Image (cartoon, rainbow, N blue to C red):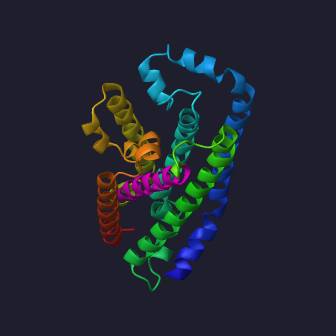
Amino acid sequence: MKALIKKELRLSRKFLLIWMGIVLLLCCFAYFEFLSMRNTLGELAEMMNAFPKILMIMFGIGEKLDSALGWYGCIYFWVAILTYSYAVYLGISSVAKEKSQGTAEYLFTKPVSRKKIVEAKALACVCNLFILAVFSGLCNYFTSILPLGGLEQKGAAVTTTIGLFLTEVILFALALLISGINQNYKRAIRLGAGLLLGFYGIYIVAEYLEIPALYYLTPLKYFDVYAVAREGINIAFLLLAAVIVAISIAVARKKWAGREM
């Protein structure tokens, strides 16, 4: 199993580096934007107040942009969208790509059970997600938090990065479940993309209508950057996340174990 994990990490290394490069480019762009607007952030914040509420929500603006948390939260939101997309892609493709590439027959005839193979791939993907989350957190710190002089909320940089990682894992597990249930790889990719867009849509509706009950229907709100920065990680959402991940991976293992190649 250790050999399978190492092989999966090696094979997925290039794609991970590409995704890290995209995150870095986004954070660098945000940094130079901050430098160019440093003296006019107050005016920008006032102008943004005139925008419709739904636009503010869609662009991840939950606080005034001239505040440290407001600017950081906005940049975090866009970085998170990138990492969530990567998590969904990993969940859909980690095992399903073996079938689409014609290597499933070879892989699943190895002297290792299918369940072990799925577990190894899942662990390798979680490692990749952890690396991307930590890298994103460091980029956010050096390009957003440090130029702002730090956040008022102590430890917020760490807790929000943990929240980013946990959300990635939830989305990965759900996408892995989709790939296990759906027999068609291309259809699974569309369903994965639809899942992320659906969660994003629920996120917008929940924020716009201010209905906390809807937060439980979208993982994008479980570890919201503003809530986590101020209050820390919510235990109820943490437990719900653990249940979703455990059930999704368990069902995915079972589906792949009994699936015809």
Q: Which residue is painted at 53% across and 38% down in the image?
A: 73
User: Which of the pair 166/71 is nearer the observer?
Assistant: 71
Residue 249 image point, x, y percent: 35, 64
Residue 3 image point, x, y percent: 56, 81
- Residue range of the region highlighted in magenta in the rendering: 157-177
User: Which of the pair 214/171 is nearer the observer?
Assistant: 214
Residue 190 image point, x, y percent: 43, 44
Asked where in the image residue 149 lies, by quadrant, the reply is top right
Residue 176 belongs to magenta span: yes
Residue 41 belongs to magenta span: no
Asked where in the image residue 235 lies, by quadrant, the reply is bottom left
Q: State the residue lying farthest toward the left.
A: 213
Q: Which residue is painted at 49% across and 56% down in the image?
A: 162
Q: State the residue lying farthest toward the bottom.
A: 111
Residue 232 lies, with reference to residue 210, above or below; the image says: below
Query: Which image quarter holds the C terminus?
Result: bottom left
Magenta stretch, main secondary structure, is: helix
Relative placement, left or right, of 249 versus 157 is left
User: Which of the pair 52/186 is nearer the observer?
Assistant: 52
Asked where in the image residue 134 lies, by quadrant, the reply is bottom right
Q: Which residue is painted at 49% across and 81% down in the image?
A: 1
Residue 193 image point, x, y percent: 44, 43
